[in-house]
Image (tube, rainbow, N blue to C red):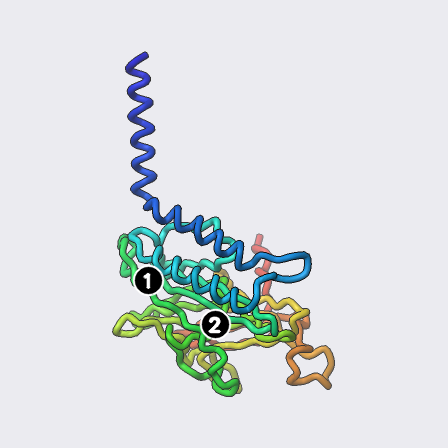
């Protein structure tokens, strides 16, 4: 009986020590603090979020400070942060890049975005490099939006929901797909190219999206806030597939608050280091041949 008790005791001691080694206790405590901050930031009554714009900034800045601190902890790259449902979390397929994003909506309908890039040199590396993403959206002229090259200090803010990667001539590129609540009437989908330069710094934007009309560094899709647009990377097709957007009437051409999907799909297919535009594709996979 004593031997059974001793074995059981040793087993639970091992289990406790393994759990403690896997995740630093500070990670767990910090996640709880972050959850409380997010819950307060997004607290709402039956109609709207109740915090003033100034308090939203205060709480979001506190979240940024807390998250920055915890991401510097060894092995934080693999910590799931499952309690933080309001925090966008995406990890690249090569397990080298992780991106966190969130936003606050002001009373005038505009948004401010926050984010971090967590980068490690290899899958077995416990230490990471952290880049703070500074929302620079309001300072970018609309005419330059598709062509400007940005970095983590000057970032086009968005909530990223998908990441895919590919390699060309020993350089790894990451395709980021995100959502931007552009205004009271228009939402946007944003497709970015992210890569890290020779100094290891993140760069957003590269002239790789080619259509018959032009080649651009990023894709911006504008549509009505009342419409829902699909935009995703499809692994089986090796393509970025998205709804074809049209105005609800020809008289609204160029007025994106009246744009929405027409039931067809377009795509960009990867060829070497270019994404080539193709209109009206079959988005569904064909049935397997017998």
Q: How far across and how far down the image is residue 165, in percent? A: 40, 65
The disc at residue 119 is 1
- Check whether the beta carbons of the residues at disc 2 and disc 1 lie within 8 A of each other: no
| Percent of width and height locating residue 74 | 29, 52
Q: Residue at x 43, y 68 (%)?
A: 175
Asked if residue 118 is positioned above or below residue 220 in the image, the reply reads: above
Left-right relation of 152 to 260 = left
Q: Nearer the viewer, residue 173 or 98?
A: 98
Q: Which mark is residue 101?
A: none
Which mark, residue 157? 2
Question: If you read the primary sequence from the N terminus, does the residue marked by circle 2 or circle 1 appear first?
Answer: 1
The residue shown at (27%, 53%) is 126
Query: How many numbered marks have been drawn onto this rendered protein structure?
Result: 2
Give how far across and how far down residue 229 sits, in percent. 61, 68
Image quarter of the N terminus: top left
Q: Is residue 216 left or right of residue 19?
A: right
Residue 262, placed above or below residue 254: above
In the rendered image, which quarter is residue 8 located in? top left
Percent x, y for residue 218?
A: 47, 77
Which residue shows up at 30% across the image and 74% down it? Answer: 197
Q: Nearer the viewer, residue 145 or 218?
A: 145
């Amino acid at each position: 009986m004593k031997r059974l008790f001793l074995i059981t005791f040793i087993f639970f001691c091992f289990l406790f020590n393994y759990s403690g080694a896997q995740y630093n206790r500070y990670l767990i405590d910090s996640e709880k603090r972050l959850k409380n901050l997010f819950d307060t930031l997004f607290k709402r009554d039956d109609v709207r979020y109740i915090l003033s714009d100034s308090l939203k900034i205060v709480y979001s800045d506190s979240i940024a400070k807390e998250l920055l601190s915890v991401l510097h902890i060894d092995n934080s790259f693999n910590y799931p942060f499952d309690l933080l449902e309001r925090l966008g979390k995406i990890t690249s397929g090569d397990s080298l890049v992780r991106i966190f994003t969130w936003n606050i909506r002001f009373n005038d309908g505009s948004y401010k975005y926050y984010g971090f890039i967590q980068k490690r040199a290899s899958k077995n590396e416990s230490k990471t490099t952290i880049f703070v993403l500074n929302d620079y959206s309001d300072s970018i002229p609309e005419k330059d939006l598709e062509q400007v090259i940005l970095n983590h200090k000057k970032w086009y803010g968005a909530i990223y929901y998908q990441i895919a990667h590919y390699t060309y001539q020993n350089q790894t590129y990451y395709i980021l797909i995100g959502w931007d609540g552009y205004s009271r009437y228009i939402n946007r989908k944003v497709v970015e190219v992210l890569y890290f330069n020779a100094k290891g710094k993140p760069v957003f934007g590269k002239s790789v999206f080619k259509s018959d009309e032009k080649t651009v560094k990023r894709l911006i899709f504008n549509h009505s806030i009342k419409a829902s647009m699909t935009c995703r990377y499809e692994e089986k097709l090796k393509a970025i597939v998205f709804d074809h957007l049209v105005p609800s009437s020809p008289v609204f051409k160029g007025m994106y608050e009246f744009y929405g999907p027409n039931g067809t799909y377009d795509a960009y297919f990867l060829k070497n280091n270019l994404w080539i535009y193709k209109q009206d594709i079959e988005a569904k996979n064909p049935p397997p041949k017998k």
